[in-house]
Image (cartoon, grey):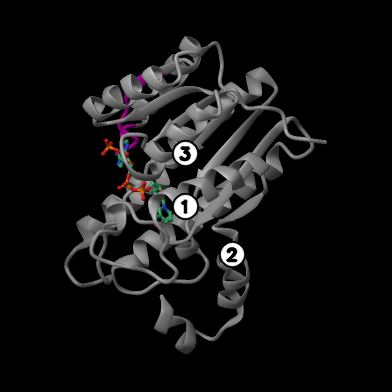
């Protein structure tokens, strides 16, 4: 059976990078949007641009700091009310700070774990409360290929944070298995955004190509999706089984 059209879509971290790019793509597909982030000036500029290009859609924006669980628990349901419900929630906001563990930069690793794990958890709670009440919805967690194996250096805490999201997604999926609530963990490879400034990862793709592949995978609603599928699906399979001395050269 084809997936239902997810008309009303919430995106966190919509003020930049992949979130902003997804907002543009979904708007061009005629979807209504609820966009959240801390930089509201950027959200409002995006709202203006999208409504000018697509006058038939609705675009709501709101300030939301995912590090503050009260902000998430208030803002997400408010945006849902303004759109009359949400059909898809994309848990996208995230950061990529970090340093080798034990090198005196605990604050950077803590910040990454806080935003990526607890910030995503807060959004999952709010989204699932709504979806349970509606009896339907699509929850999307933006993870990373950095979650597949332990990463060294600046990406240790980041990789761990994204591995937590894979587990969170699968646990929620298992909880509502067989219902009309779908849950996807999406693992992008390296896509050119602010999060990657100054470090070019393996198989890096440009923002447009990356966002198009991301939206295509989300629309398919898999339990786990890779972005782009090629080469990341086979590479991920390989990374899972290669011994650490080999893997650490690439991670
Ligand atoms: N680009 C890649 O190669 C890549 C690969 C794998 C996974 N990802 C994941 O994709 C997601 C988006 O990343 P990106 O590449 O688009 O990075 P980005 O360009 O740096 O954008 C990050 C977004 O997250 C928001 N954000 C950060 N902290 C927040 C907070 N405390 N509260 C609310 N919003 C917050 C930012 O908005 P404000 O600063 O305005 O709040 C911004 O809109 C992240 O989860 C990232 O880990 C990216």
Q: Is residue 202 above or below residue 196?
A: below
Q: Which mark is residue 209?
A: 1
The vertical placement of 125 against 153, above or below, is: above
- Mark found first going from the N terminus, 3 or 2: 3
**x and y percent of residue 163 in the render?**
50, 59
Region in magenta: 60-68
Q: Give me the residue at 75% from left, 40% from top.
A: 177
Rate crowding at label 3 as few (under 14), some (14 to 19) or many (20 or more) other CA atoms within 10 Å.
Answer: many
Q: Which residue is mark 3?
A: 91
**Lower sequence index among marks 3 and 1:** 3
Which quadrant is home to the C terminus? bottom left
Mark number, residue 244:
none
Q: Which residue is tagged 2?
A: 230
Q: Is residue 65 magenta?
A: yes
Other residues around mark 1 within 10 Å, as few (<14) / some (14–19) / many (≥20)? few
On the image, the x and y values in percent for residue 214 come to 52, 47
Q: CA distance from mark 1 to mark 2?
A: 12 Å
Furthest residue toward bottom: 245
Q: Quadrant of ligand 1?
A: top left
State the residue in front, 232 or 68: 232
Mark 3 or mark 2: which is in front? 2
Percent across and percent down for residue 15 are: 31, 34
Tell me the quarter of the picture where residue 237 sits.
bottom right
């Amino acid at each position: 059976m084809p997936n239902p059209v997810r008309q009303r879509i919430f995106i966190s971290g919509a003020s930049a990078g992949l979130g902003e790019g997804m907002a543009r793509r979904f708007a061009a597909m005629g979807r209504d949007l609820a966009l959240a982030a801390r930089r509201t000036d950027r959200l409002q500029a995006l709202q203006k641009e999208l409504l000018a290009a697509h006058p038939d859609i609705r675009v709501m924006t709101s300030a939301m700091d995912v590090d503050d669980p009260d902000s998430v628990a208030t803002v997400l349901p408010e945006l849902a009310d303004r759109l009359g419900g949400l059909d898809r929630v994309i848990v996208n906001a995230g950061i990529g700070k970090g340093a080798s563990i034990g090198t005196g930069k605990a604050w950077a690793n803590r910040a990454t774990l806080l935003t990526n794990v607890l910030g995503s958890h807060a959004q999952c709670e709010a989204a699932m409360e709504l979806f349970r009440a509606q009896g339907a919805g699509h929850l999307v967690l933006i993870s990373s290929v950095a979650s597949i194996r332990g990463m060294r250096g600046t990406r240790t805490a980041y990789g761990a944070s994204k591995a937590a999201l894979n587990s969170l997604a699968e646990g929620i999926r298992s909880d509502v298995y067989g219902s009309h609530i779908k849950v996807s963990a999406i693992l992008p490879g390296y896509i050119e955004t602010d999060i990657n400034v100054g470090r070019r990862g393996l198989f890096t793709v440009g923002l447009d190509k990356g966002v198009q592949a991301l939206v295509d995978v989300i629309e398919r609603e898999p339990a786990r999706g890779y972005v782009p599928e090629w080469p990341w699906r086979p590479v991920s399979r390989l990374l899972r089984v290669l011994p650490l001395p080999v893997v650490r050269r690439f991670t």
